[in-house]
Image (cartoon, rainbow, N blue to C red):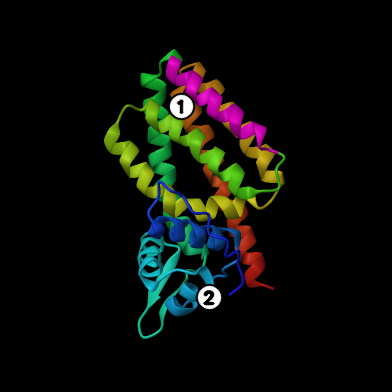
Amino acid sequence: MAFNTDIKMDAYLPLRDVVFQTLRQAILKGDLKPGERLMEIQLSHKLGVSRTPIREAIRKLELEGLVLMIPRKGAEVAKITEKSLRDVLEIRLALEQLAVRLACERMTPELLQIIKDAAMECAQVENTDDPLAVAEKDVAFHDAIHIATKNQKLINMLDNLQEQVYRYRVEYLKRDATHSQIVREHDEIIQAMEKGDSDSASDLCSVHIKNQVKIVSDMLRGSAGD
């Protein structure tokens, strides 16, 4: 179990949340591998905390789909499968297309500027070698579109889905070539939204997500063949 054990304490966060973020980052970066067991006692010693925040963090990671609880074995890092990828991204595709359409209908100059600013911030980290940094900016771009829908129920559904999608988003962004691709796709979506062309914006959003499905699926097939 090799990963960075330097917990970044935050005076504003409970210890369980700090432990959760530490383990989450280790899983997303691949320091904790799919199928690797998460032993409470071992993690407690490694991170220098009691077992209680470890147990609470593992429970939250299970809700995000990053950890599985196996009967008589305990917790382990969830494997990334093509089936789970397609299941979650089918739902995301439908909801994101709805969000783009509603945002086009309800757009204001102020909301459009927020979306443009989010896209610009994503472009600024395009050349980084840190997929997590790009993933965070990509999330912010889509969050800005969600807010523009002015539909709180839809926003809540997409927020809940974001956590399940995040791991696949990071896998997708581990290929440096995808960074420039998402920046270009963001710009194309914005151009369609500026024109109020909800059909084009929805189609472009579909391409944006399907590209992610294809690349991650190819990566999973490649690793299965290794």
Which percent across, then down, holds residue 54? Answer: 41, 68
Could you say whether the residue bearing mark 2 is in a helix, strand or loop? loop
In percent of the image, x 43 and y 51: which residue is there? 163
Q: Main secondary structure of the magenta part?
A: helix
The disc placed on residue 199 is 1
In percent of the image, x 51 and y 59: which residue is there? 22
Residue at the far bottom in the pictured view: 72
In percent of the image, x 40 and y 56: which residue is there? 17
| Mark 2 lies on residue | 36
Q: Is residue 64 left or right of residue 150?
A: right
Name the one closer to the observer, 92 or 32. 32
Which percent across, then down, holds residue 116? Answer: 54, 23
Q: Quadrant of the C terminus?
A: bottom right
Q: Quadrant of the N terminus?
A: bottom right
Q: Is residue 181 above or below residue 169?
A: above
Crowding at dot 1, Cα within 10 Å, few <14 / some 14-19 / many 20+, comes out as some
Which percent across, then down, holds residue 49? Answer: 44, 68
Identify the magenta region: 110-126
